Amino acid sequence: MPVLAGIRPDTLSTMAIERRSVLRVVGLAAALAALMGVVACTGEPPAADQSSSPPASPSDPSVPSQPEVSVVAEDLDVPWSVTFHDGTALVSERETAMILEINPDGSAREVGQVRDVAPRGEGGLLGIAIHDGDLFVYLSASDENRIDRYDLTGESGSLGLGASETILGGLPVAQNHNGGRIAFGPDGMLYVTAGDAGNPAGAQDLGTLAGKILRVMPDGDVPADNPFGGSPVYSYGHRNPQGIAWDEDGVLYASEFGQSTWDELNVIEAGGNYGWPDVEGAAGREGFIDPVQQWDPAEASPSGIAVTGGAIFIANLRGERLRVVPLDDLTASSERFVGEYGRLRDVVVAPDGALWLVTNNTAGRGDAQPGDDRIIRLTVG
């Protein structure tokens, strides 16, 4: 297997700055100012009592002190992932295995129940994605995690689940560390995050799909240009990655749960080894790629991520905050909504450009409030 030299965060930051244009930097400043109303703070883990970053100066009329916030839907049951089909939002519920359609008035309609889901611990119905009008789902069955493709029937307001087929099976399943995020990349390939399923050594074993980011064609076949011939493995040495997203240059970013020392944000390279379980966080060891940022798990537990407006937005569970990392400086970050909405499972970009946050307070680990769980919409300007 190839051995890749570790890449330090400051090197990656320099590379990112060099490859992005002045327009990107200007766009980032405007988007962050309008949406977040905060200034960037250090990339080092914040102190335990640190709250949201301070708002931008109110003397600048172009910078609103608060984004517009509204509730899209509420009273959801452990929502996990959101995707969009012809402008209609679809939501997966982990425990009920239900796909929901969110109506314009915020009500949720049942599209159908995904078959063979065996919820337990962190497993169940997890990530969902749309491609060519089909619905792809990541599910935990009794003996495996797998990806199924469903036909979607009907129109918005009356969508249903049709025939299904498994396109990728045999992913290790366990009570915890199931990964579960799926997304189609700019290359049209399906990317899948697979956790180590409680077997840390498996993350370094290219003969198993545990602890990997996988890349397959929409029919489940292995692309000819994958880094390990005939294998769906795209990168390895991951513990429990749950967020993947791309910037407009096609760079892939992934969030990852650490064990007890560091949670991570990584820039993913084909064939890259990200260290787990030999290292956690930045180690500077040859053969492993270091994260560009790392955080104390108590203030992070990063799940879904999204890229828009020149920044990476990261939903944090245990940390109960939305973290913002500017693409022109991957070692910097700011925070918002610390503790305001509880645990955040996912963040997605809606068709109109707004950000949607998915709370996760009804799963047994959060402090559920009336109306939980919710989808919250943030608008710019």
Image (cartoon, rainbow, N blue to C red):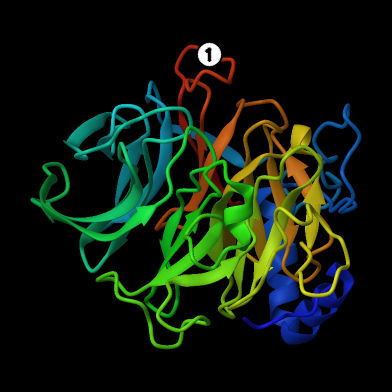
Q: Where 186 sits versus 75, above or below?
A: below
Q: From the image, tell me which residue sits under label 1.
A: 369
On the picture, is 130 further left or further right than 251?
left
Closer to the camera in the image, 253 or 324: 253
x and y percentages locating residue 80 in the rendered image: 43, 38
Q: If the image is split into quadrants, where does the N terminus sit? A: bottom right
Q: Where 182 sits versus 371, above or below?
A: below
Closer to the camera in the image, 162 or 337: 162
Instruction: Tell me where residue 192 sits by quadrant.
Output: bottom left
Residue 65 visible in the snapshot: no
Instruction: Tell me where residue 29 sits by quadrant.
Output: bottom right
Residue shown at 42%/71% (left/top)?
232
Marks counted in the figure total 1
Q: Secondary structure at mark 1?
A: loop
Q: Residues within 10 Å of mark 1 (few under 14, many from 20)?
A: few
x and y percentages locating residue 336 in the rendered image: 72, 39
x and y percentages locating residue 193 in the rendered image: 50, 56
As shown in the figure, which amino acid type bears the numbered disc 1?
Answer: Gln
Residue shown at 52%/35% (left/top)?
176
x and y percentages locating residue 87 in the rendered image: 29, 55
On the picture, is 156 further left or further right than 124?
left
Q: Where 288 sits versus 121, above or below?
A: below
